[in-house]
Image (cartoon, grey):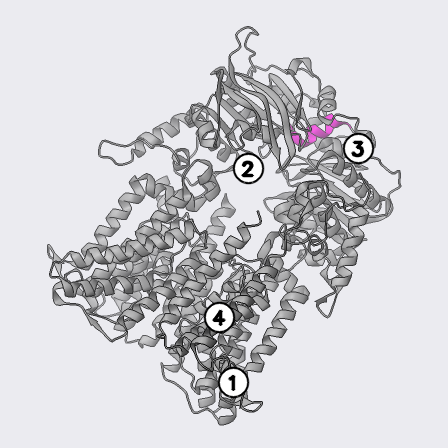
């Protein structure tokens, strides 16, 4: 895989000799409570390049970016700008030094207009009467958006903008700072293909003017398309930095993961049984449409797609959180209405949410409290909770999942991410579900805990449960799924049956970014295989 | 399709309340004799001047995402100060300065408790509402404090042929409008109320922004107390009980969101006038005074429900 | 790696934080003892059982409201309308009795009014998604206004003796006020409900993390409705006792009572933003504040100091919560 250089979104490589370093991390490391999130990392960002930083979740990418953006101060090493050691004590200082960041979770002021958002926190121009010079501000804003080839109502409140346009506002903010380095964190995660292509055009435009782009993405295809150099992080250390053209995709994956995938996930061979859950033409207005699939006993089905494709929404509709508006759900062959999450649980369906902290657990409360919370009815009589049975159940899962904690009364907050995730799984399994919907089950979890969670999922399938796994980590799905469903913009765009999946075809169905390259399959993604 | 500016005008938070005010005024003009006279309309506005001024200040606090319910007691405390100092001196401005001083001091205390002590503003100002009322009762329990005639100019006098309370309301509105339109102070309030985390990220000092809003409310109460004392002429220790409810009602009715970040400078004025018009209409139609609170409460409930529905609708569109 | 031992892998796991409510509740009990001792020195005879028990008549209604308010605040809400609703219940009962309804039927109507008032608050909060502060601010005016409107601000006071004896008689040798057992039973019931039942668990869950509670299969809206309904029911009980105690139903009853109620709950350790708080804490909060107010009056301090003290305790109570909470970090 070499970068396709295409006339519209050219990545022009500056000659090797004329290299200007925009900024540099030297031996940088950051420690949280005795554990190094990243350690001794050297990173050189050159003016006018697109530098991709790759790595699995927890590899230290975000910590590294936060050091560049003044959110964290390095505990070792330092940041250099144009050869000068700087202390980036806050995002504001970083921006004053010319480093801007467009975060994945956009952080704008939803109630303020677009123009306002560009000027919050900085000196606004004034007229000679001392009043704010709105005319100048709007002109400057228009100029900034003009440079991005973006036209939209700059007086509208940001709340009313699409995700792509809100992102343009963040980028325009960065440009108005005269940023020399712009960090883009998963910028295409919530974009459509056309929006993504427009963003790549803008990135090309910026690099031609000498702006350095630090690009973070999980989407290997687009990294190969636009990045000039790639740095790979793993377990908090820098593994590799080099030109994209010197790399290929398998080698990159190998470096990111660090070990053959088979070592992480052991698949117990088993044969799927009868259909437990059938979804027919399921849709929710404005979110997803026409979703049909079947989930059988003892089967693990992966649900792939980009963030924003509607995967979580489908799972949550089946769980009754935001019920579907059309289509039908059959459980063990019988049509079933699931108007809310309590009736889903009563019918043997459980959903393990992706946001552990906000959706999954009550962090300040004890471990046993959390484990029993979904299944209170099972451990109570006449509405009174039996603390003895609560303790027994919690003990059982602690032993079963090897949850490492000093006491079951300790708040979940005191656990590591992996152990929190195991508590979340225990909480779901307390209700003895038959149909288990897992949303990003290994997000923010270290490699060891990951392997343990894979083992738990495998055990569930072996015990005859039907398991649906939503994941953004392709490798995870490739290695554990019996089948993989792919969603794109609210629709199923492909169904693939294992064990020998074609990552390229799945990627094509999911993204469409590869559409031109994988012409034959991507034009009619629904018909792949 | 409308022109964009019309579209935007319609989307402004005070658009619906203004429309409501216009419709109800027209209805009253047609149905209620004596409503549509300049004397009655001027009466209404000078009667709501005190609520309007304090609401304008309270509006700042609410826009910043906080709340101040201590204003009922604070207005009484300032009015007491104003009248007491009025007895001591014939100088017209000294009582006002004293009242402003008390307002500023209490506002600062509120601000410190909320921003430094990190006590939620509802609790901090509830405590202040109770404590301050206790203080007023302790000082003024021996009956009625008369406001000396010389000190009633802010309530009864006129400036260039206009009634002083109306001039006061207009001037205070103009000041806040200027602040909110043309100073970093004013713009930062909206930013902090809209998204506190993002405000921190761009380096705004949210605590200080909020502190200034509490100061403004204190000053607003100090100023309004001069008009209040002048208008009613005698002050009891229980004066202005429940006043905070009227002001919150005015702000919310006018279109400012109780959760902060969304609203306008005009909202509290519209809301105060709306309350004044409706109470006036009740009086003119000889509805018993016992119905006032009921109508007021229903209005607030209606306003927040409409706001919630509108807000949800606008979010769904995006 | 997979050995199920209790060995901790990270330093953060080694020491679970001590349960916050535990230490604080004990501190509050200590405060109550010190306070009563001080009052015993200041006011001769204050600590005699008869005197202490008699004083309870001043806080039975507030105490009952505080129990319900604990549920509301633990769930992340607030109810400013309780005092107004209390007056409305009282007036509805009094007027329907005056209009010729048998008193038990009038009382039943009153209880229904209380529950309905609570459910209206709950429905607006749960199903319309409105901010509880504004909703109950509006219903505070509505309920009070309705009480004024239907009674035309006139009082009803010709209740039969069996009714007024609920709030005015004593038993056990003239020592225990008749209404005290109501508070005791209500407190025990509320303690069981909040601390031991699935409903209580869900109340905590909603207050601590509403979204996670929804994802745990809890019908959040229905639980919220029940919380405010329970509050309304307790308001009605308090209204009966108050009406019996003063022998009068009137629309301006207990104006401003919501504030000392909230102060007592917060002083008792309930976190104003929800997710933490206990009934024993609330009971202690009620006792500390009520005996302080009453004792100071007995000691010759002017009544109006009571307001200042409640206000100060409200702020200091939350400030103390903040300091306690910040300390372990």
Coordinates of residue B166 in the picture (x, y in percent): 20, 57
Nearer the viewer's eye, disc 2 or disc 3?
3
Q: Residue at x 32, y 51 (%)?
A: B215
Subunit ID for the residue under disc 1: C
Magenta span includes A509 = yes
Task: Please name the residue that numbered disc 4 is placed on.
Answer: C35
Does label 2 or label 3 sit earlier along the sequence? 2
Nearer the viewer's eye, disc 1 or disc 2?
1
Q: Is residue B24 left or right of residue A242?
A: left
Cβ–Cβ under 8 Å for marks 1 and 2: no
Secondary element at image label 1: helix
Q: Is residue B137 left or right of residue A302?
A: left
Nearer the viewer's eye, disc 4 or disc 3?
4
Does label 1 or label 4 sit earlier along the sequence? 4
Above/below status of C164 relative to A197: below
Most common secondary structure along the magenta stretch: helix
Q: Which mark is residue C252?
A: none
The one nearer the camera, B266 or A185, is A185
Q: Which mark is residue A264?
A: 3
The one nearer the camera, B221 or C4, is C4
Above/below status of A148 relative to B18: above
Cα separation, mark 4 vs mark 3, equals 63 Å
Coordinates of residue B86 in the picture (x, y in percent): 16, 63
Q: Which mark is residue A105?
A: 2
- Magenta residues? A502-512
Task: Please name the residue that numbered disc 1 is placed on.
Answer: C50
10 Å crowding of disc 2: few (<14), some (14-19), many (20+):
few
Establish whether labels 1 and 2 are both on one chain: no
Above/below status of B144 relative to B22: below
Cα separation, mark 1 vs mark 3, equals 73 Å
């Amino acid at each position: 895989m070499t970068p396709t250089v295409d006339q519209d979104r050219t990545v022009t490589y500056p000659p090797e000799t004329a290299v200007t370093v925009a900024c540099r991390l030297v031996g940088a490391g950051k420690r949280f409570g005795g554990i190094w999130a990243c350690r001794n990392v050297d990173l050189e960002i050159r003016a006018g390049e697109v530098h991709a930083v790759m790595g699995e979740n927890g590899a230290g990418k975000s910590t590294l970016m936060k050091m560049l953006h003044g959110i964290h101060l390095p505990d070792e090493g330092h940041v250099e700008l144009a050869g000068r050691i700087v202390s980036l004590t806050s995002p504001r200082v970083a921006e004053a030094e010319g480093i801007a960041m467009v975060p994945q979770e956009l952080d704008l002021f939803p109630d303020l207009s677009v123009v306002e958002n560009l000027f919050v926190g900085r000196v606004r121009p004034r007229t000679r009467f001392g009043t704010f010079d709105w005319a100048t501000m709007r002109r400057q804003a228009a100029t900034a958006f003009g440079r991005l080839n973006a036209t939209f109502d700059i007086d509208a409140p940001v709340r009313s903008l699409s995700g792509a346009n809100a992102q343009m506002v963040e980028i325009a903010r960065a440009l108005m700072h005269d940023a020399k380095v712009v960090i883009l964190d998963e910028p295409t995660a919530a974009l459509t293909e056309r929006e993504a292509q427009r963003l790549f055009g803008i990135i090309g435009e910026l690099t031609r003017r000498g702006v350095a782009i630090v690009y973070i993405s999980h989407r290997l295809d687009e990294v190969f398309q636009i990045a000039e150099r790639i740095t790979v992080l793993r377990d908090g250390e820098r593994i590799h930095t080099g030109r994209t053209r010197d790399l290929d995709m398998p080698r990159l994956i190998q470096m990111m993961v660090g070990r053959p995938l088979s070592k992480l996930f052991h698949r117990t061979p088993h044969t799927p049984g009868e259909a437990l859950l059938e979804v027919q033409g399921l849709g929710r207005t404005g979110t997803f449409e026409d979703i049909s699939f079947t989930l059988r006993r003892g089967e693990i089905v992966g649900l792939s797609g980009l963030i924003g494709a509607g995967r979580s929404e489908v799972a949550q509709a089946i769980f009754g959180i935001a019920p579907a508006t059309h289509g039908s759900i059959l459980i063990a062959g019988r049509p079933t209405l699931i108007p809310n999450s309590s009736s889903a649980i009563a019918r043997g369906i459980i959903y393990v949410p992706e946001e552990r902290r906000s959706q999954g657990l009550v962090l300040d409360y004890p471990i046993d409290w959390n484990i029993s919370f979904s299944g209170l009815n099972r451990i109570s009589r006449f509405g009174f909770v039996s603390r003895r049975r609560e303790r027994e159940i919690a003990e059982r899962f602690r032993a079963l999942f090897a949850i490492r904690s000093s006491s079951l009364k300790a708040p979940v907050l005191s656990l590591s991410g992996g152990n929190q995730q195991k508590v979340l799984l225990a909480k779901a399994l307390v209700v003895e579900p038959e149909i288990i919907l897992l949303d990003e089950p290994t997000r923010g979890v270290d490699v060891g805990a990951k392997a343990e969670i894979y083992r738990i999922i495998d055990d569930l399938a072996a015990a005859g449960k039907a398991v649906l796994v939503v994941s953004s980590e392709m490798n995870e799905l490739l290695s554990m799924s019996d089948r993989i469903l792919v969603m794109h913009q609210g629709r199923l765009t492909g169904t693939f049956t294992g064990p020998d999946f074609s990552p390229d075809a799945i990627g094509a169905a999911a993204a469409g970014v590869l559409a031109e390259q994988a012409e034959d399959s991507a034009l009619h993604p629904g018909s792949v295989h | 399709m409308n022109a964009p500016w019309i579209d935007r005008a319609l989307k402004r938070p005070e658009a619906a309340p203004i429309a409501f005010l216009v419709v109800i005024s027209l209805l009253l003009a047609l149905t209620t004799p004596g409503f549509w006279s300049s004397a009655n309309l001027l009466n209404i506005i000078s009667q709501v001047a005190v609520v309007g001024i304090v609401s304008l200040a309270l509006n700042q606090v609410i826009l910043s995402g906080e709340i101040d319910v201590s204003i009922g007691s604070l207005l009484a405390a300032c009015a007491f100060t104003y009248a007491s100092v009025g007895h001591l001196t014939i100088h017209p401005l000294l009582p006002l300065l004293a009242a402003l001083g008390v307002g500023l001091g209490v506002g600062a205390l509120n601000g410190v408790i909320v921003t430094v002590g990190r006590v939620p503003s509802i609790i901090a100002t509830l405590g202040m509402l109770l404590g301050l009322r206790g203080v007023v009762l302790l000082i003024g329990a021996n009956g009625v404090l008369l406001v000396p005639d010389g000190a009633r100019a802010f309530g009864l006098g006129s400036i260039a042929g206009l009634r002083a309370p109306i001039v006061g309301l207009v001037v205070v509105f103009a000041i806040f409008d200027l602040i909110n339109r043309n100073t970093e102070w004013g713009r930062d309030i909206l930013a902090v109320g809209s998204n506190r985390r993002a405000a921190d990220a761009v380096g705004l000092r949210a605590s200080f922004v909020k502190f200034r809003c509490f100061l403004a409310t204190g000053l607003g109460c100090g100023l309004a107390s001069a008009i209040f004392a002048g208008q009613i002429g005698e002050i009891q220790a229980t004066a202005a009980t429940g006043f905070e409810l009227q002001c919150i009602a005015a702000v919310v009715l006018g279109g400012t969101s109780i959760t902060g970040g969304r609203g306008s400078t005009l909202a509290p004025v519209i809301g105060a006038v709306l309350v004044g018009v409706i109470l006036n209409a009740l009086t003119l139609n000889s509805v018993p005074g016992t119905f006032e609170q009921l109508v007021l409460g229903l209005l607030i409930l209606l306003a927040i429900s409409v706001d919630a529905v509108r807000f949800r609708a606008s979010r769904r569109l995006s | 790696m997979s050995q199920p031992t209790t060995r901790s892998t990270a330093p953060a796991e080694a020491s679970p934080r001590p349960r916050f409510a535990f230490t604080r509740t004990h501190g509050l009990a200590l405060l109550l003892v010190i306070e009563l001792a001080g009052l015993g020195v200041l006011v001769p005879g204050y600590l005699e059982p008869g005197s202490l028990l008699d004083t309870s008549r001043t806080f039975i209604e507030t105490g009952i409201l505080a129990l319900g308010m604990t549920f509301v605040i633990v769930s992340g809400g607030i109810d400013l309308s309780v005092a107004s609703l209390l007056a409305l219940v009282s007036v509805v009962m009094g007027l329907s009795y005056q209009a010729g309804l048998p008193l038990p039927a009038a009382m039943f109507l009153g209880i229904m009014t209380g529950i309905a008032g609570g459910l209206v608050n709950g429905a607006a909060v749960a199903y319309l998604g409105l901010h509880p502060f504004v909703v109950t601010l509006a219903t505070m005016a509505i309920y009070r206004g309705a009480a004024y409107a239907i009674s035309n601000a006139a009082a009803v006071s010709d209740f039969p003796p069996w009714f007024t004896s609920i709030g005015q008689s004593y038993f056990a040798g003239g020592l225990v006020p008749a209404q005290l057992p109501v508070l005791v039973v209500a407190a025990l019931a509320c303690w069981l409900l909040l601390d031991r039942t699935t409903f209580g668990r869900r109340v905590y869950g909603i207050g601590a993390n509403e979204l996670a509670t929804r994802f745990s299969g809890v019908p959040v809206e229905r639980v919220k409705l029940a919380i405010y309904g329970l509050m309304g029911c307790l308001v009605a009980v308090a209204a009966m006792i108050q009406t019996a105690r003063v022998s009068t139903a009137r629309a301006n009853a207990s104006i401003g009572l919501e504030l000392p109620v909230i102060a007592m709950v917060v002083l008792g350790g309930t976190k104003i933003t929800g997710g933490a708080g206990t009934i024993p804490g609330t009971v202690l909060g009620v006792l500390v504040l009520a005996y302080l107010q009453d004792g100071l009056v007995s000691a010759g301090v002017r009544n109006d100091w009571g307001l200042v003290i409640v206000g100060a305790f409200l702020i200091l109570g939350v400030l103390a919560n903040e300091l306690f909470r910040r300390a372990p970090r």
